[in-house]
Amino acid sequence: MIDPFEVPDATFVVLTNEAAQHSLWPSALSPPPGWDRMYGPASKLRCQRYIDAYGRTKGPVVTAGLSANQEFLLGFDRGDTDGAFGERHTLAGAWWIRGEVDTVALRAALDAVVARHEILRTLLVADDGGHRQVIHPAQPVRLVLRDLSGIALADRPARAEQLLNEVDAEPFPVRELPHLRAVLGRFDPGEAVLVLATHHTATDAWSMEVLMRDVSAAYTAAEPLPPATQYREFAAWESTSEATSGNERARGYWRQALADATVTGLPTDRPLRPGHPDAYAVQRFVLDPELSSGVTAHARAMRSSPFMVLLAAYHTYLWQRLGRCDLVTPTFAAGRQNDRFGATVGPIFNMVPLRTDLNGCRTFNDVLRRTRRTCVEAYANELSFAEVAQLVPKITETFTDSTVAVAAFEVLQYPPTGRTVRLGAAVVTPLRDRRVSQDVSSAIPDGALWALDITPAGEIVGSLKYNRVTFDDDTIADIVAGFQAVLRAACAAPDAPLPPM
Amino acid sequence: MEPSSSIQERFAAVVRRFPDGPAITGGGTTLSYRELDVAAEQFAGRLRLLGVRSGDTVAVLTGRTADVAIVLLGVLRAGACYVPLHDGYPTERLGFIVEECRARVLVTDQATSRGKVLPSTEQVLVVDGASIASEAAPSRLASTVGPDETAYIMYTSGSTGRPKGVAVPHRAVVSLAEDSLWDSGRHDTILSVAPFGFGVAAYELWVPLLRGGHVVVAPTTTFDLPSLRLWIEQYSISALHVTAGLFRVLAHEDPTVLSTVREVLTGGDVISPAAVRAVLEANQGLVVRAMYGATETSSFVLSAAVTVPDEVGTPVPVGVPLRDVHAYLLDERLTPVPPGQEGELYLAGPRLAQGYIGRPDLTADRFVADPFGTGTQMYRTGDVMYRKPDGQYEFVFRIGEQIKIRGFRVEPREIEAALTRCVGVADAAVSARAGPAGEKRLVAYLVGPPDLDLNAVRVQVARSLPEYMIPTALVVLDALPLTKNGKLDRTALPEPEPSGPPYRAPRTDRQRILCELFAEVLEVDTVGIEHSFFDLNGQSLSAIKLVGRIRAALTVDVSVGDLFDAPTVAELDAVIDGLGTAEPEGSDNAISAIRGGAS
């Protein structure tokens, strides 16, 4: 006995009746009287997403075309569990709140932020004519209060980070609206930590800071906030002549820069297993104060950014580990060149493949100079990764190689810091010096991710997120240690000859 | 009364017919229909003053007193729907529920909310006994609620790791109450023992209240057999529903508890034919009725009555559809199967729920187009059955993995999701296994380091899962066994081994007897005085058995609560030492709540 609704790989249609109810229906069978087909045939997942997008509210919904980055994310769609639209592809951030918090006002502020940013209530759905963004009406945010009283002052930073890690590890299905949840952990009436969790297809690191500022503004302001520039406006802007004017030159650059290249993969301990869900974890590390300031000082001396120094060290490390000098590492750019979208919430981040050939480099500074040139040229010619991949499809071959994982490398970027962020009288500061590793963490759509953060105090904290299905913890620990050793040697003696490769 | 009415309209008609009849008893109070009517109207007035309007949702977390009827009817009269919460749920789950159903108000009482972190809603209304309806004048507003509006939302276990809210319309409840099954007169006085948050509560509360019957609310949903006997005798109970698990214990330990009852309903899991026979043999004239249903079909939809011990089927059949229930057995092409052939059960008719709130995708997957209607829906049960020559439906198996533990529906994936969130747990699989007493229990297989702190895992999952979903046994594995297709190989999961402290022999006669009784009930070879009831996979049902035997063997008044507080022989022995006098009969103190039974 097989249930016709549970047949693997079967196709379905979506039916609707006069009462605007929906029914999945095996596409091989004809619909009963009183029911009309409205979508399909398509996979069950596609049909359910369609119903989710159009079946929640009676009456018309606003729809819009996709951004290039949303198209890119769809390339990593592996269903509701894993991949870009998986329930663990989430992004969480935490902030210290020092001063009293009124939870009624906080709740209202969170709701106002969802009302303000459409992307927090947008679902992507495959329509008969292709994918669309479907924007839903505002819904209240789930704010969970956690009692953290009785924890000594000295233990609070670790407990706050633990709370952030717990929220980060929690599944957050992409079909749950709004794409924003909040947890407020209160140590005492004057100190709390606020964790905001989002689905990563609705935000990026930059957006998280925008969200917190908007929560602050809505909490503090008597008036409703002025309307924000919406993500769908960004998607529409991407194809305007203003946005694409330099693209012809950029296309020429990428064709040449990435000719015959593939993204560099890290060899894994074992291949992905079909049917076995991803199990992401994070190992964190903190550069000691001398090394942290060494990196920033050396960057300044070489007229580079700390990112360039860190990436140069990573490339030097990869050269030693893999024995290859032609390296392509993807990074994530903020994608916020146009100030108009500086306060827009949404996945504006863009993957940029950085190719550097280290052949002939004798010192770390040689590597750094080449890395610097790569970065400067790539920034000047930024194109959406979707378009780059179309120009030079070969570079994405690594993603389908079962023996390696693509490791992206980024330094987190935030909007410029200005005035102090407050909730009423309470002062809000981001919790960014994260140092507690996670056995279970949020996931990424594929591969591994280095994320480094230069905290406001100047300390550099880093993390490597990886899939435990493919990597042993020890392998990752070895890679993390190897990278730090190279970085330390590089900053100590940047002009010393590199060991022979 | 035409079937197209709301619960409150139907109730109003009952009030006119039986104004002075007893409607509900609980917490030491009995309300007549007239008194309940007036109080409910006043309470509706209070809710309106708080801003509750038509279409709103009100969460209800009250104790087991007569007030529950005032609150539920008051919510409905205010035009809102109620969401019954279970006080056994952890705060996190309660929080999720009130957020998801957007409850505007939470109604609770002092006794239930004391010492509990309440989920946050716009308003919390704490009611208690005397003051429940005293503050607002009644305002007779015409009811504008139609039969197709939501009466209540009940939460069940969901597969994606979060509970699902089933929205049940007035029409479904009224249809259930109007079923001719209750016309026998055997359901005049019903004992309510199920938590208000579970599907059976629709029968226990609304069948009597919408027919002029009398509902007696048991002070607790976890009890021992002497308490059950006491309530049945004290209130002349004519009918009640007990879970299949409790029914088995009752049949085994003391079937005469039901000697004055006229009809006993049971279901929610496999019903033991031997238990049915034992109960019938001990109680001449009693009707045992096997019930089949789901929250999605507003409780019972099929039933099988048995009155003669020799006619108990093996297995006990699912039975025949209730009135207005359309039951279809369909094949892969959704066409009816011939009699005797297996098909999946689909249900249609006025008893269907409206779907899962906020989950149109799940709703469209379970409430599908009815090929035998025009634009109507049918509910896909996932149960495969066949029809016997006498027309009775008989259960064969359940499609998929959903399991029932002690009558509660459980999605293993929800538990697995909670386990994998625990520190150190890389992967998890949950399976239902037969325990030492043949009873189904949950076993969790965890992938993690060999020194994984299992107690910490238990504490962490207890934060988000109700007690009955917490696995009884935890087993650490290097990796989960997989089939060739990379799917979890459930057949290769090992049986859990009982663990605990080393054996220490009893030192007194009483300890020796206790050790023997522990071993007998928990079906293990030997029990030392330091071995804990819980480490030996004890559960609430085995606790009832064990306490019954201890009382009989030692003539002492230990309670289930004593066993839970003092779960080793050594500890329980000390408790018995301290027992001076027998507990007062009939007081609530005599009924010990069973908490954390499976941990």
Image (tube, coloured by chain):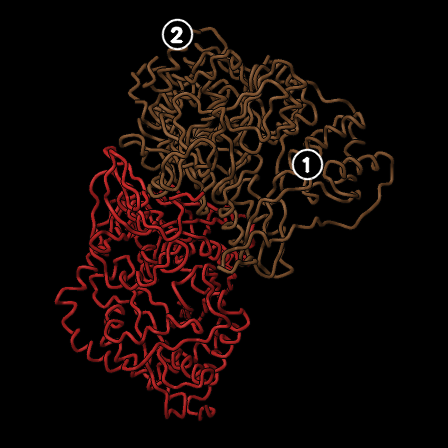
Q: Which residue was labeled with disc 1?
A: B564
Q: Is residue B201 visible?
A: no
- The chain painted red is A
Q: Position of residue B382 (x, y in %)?
A: 45, 39
Q: Colour of chain B?
A: brown
Give the mark, 1 or 2, whose residue is nearer the N terminus.
Answer: 2
Q: Quadrant of residue A413?
A: bottom left
Q: Residue furthest right?
A: B508
The subunit letter for the residue under badge 2 reads: B
Secondary element under disc 1, as helix, strand or loop, is helix
The image shows residue B412, relative to residue B597, as above or below, that is below
Amino acid found under the numbered disc labelled 1: Phe
Q: Nearer the viewer, residue B374 or B511?
A: B374
| Label disc, if present, on residue B16 of the rendered structure | 2
Q: Nearer the viewer, residue B486 or B241?
A: B486
The residue sitting at 52% across, 33% down in the picture is B87
User: Crowding near pointer 1: few (<14 within 10 Å), some, many (20+)?
Assistant: many
Q: In which quadrant of the rendered image does the C terminus of chain B lie?
A: top right
User: Crowding near pointer 2: few (<14 within 10 Å), some, many (20+)?
Assistant: few
Secondary element under disc 2, as helix, strand or loop, is helix
Do tags 1 and 2 sit on the same chain? yes
The residue sitting at 52% across, 61% down in the picture is A439
Amino acid found under the numbered disc labelled 2: Arg
The image shows residue B245, relative to residue A86, as above or below, that is above
Q: Residue furthest left?
A: A241
The image shows residue A158, relative to residue A177, as above or below, that is below
Q: Position of residue A202 (x, y in %)?
A: 31, 56
Q: Position of residue A86 (x, y in %)?
A: 39, 56
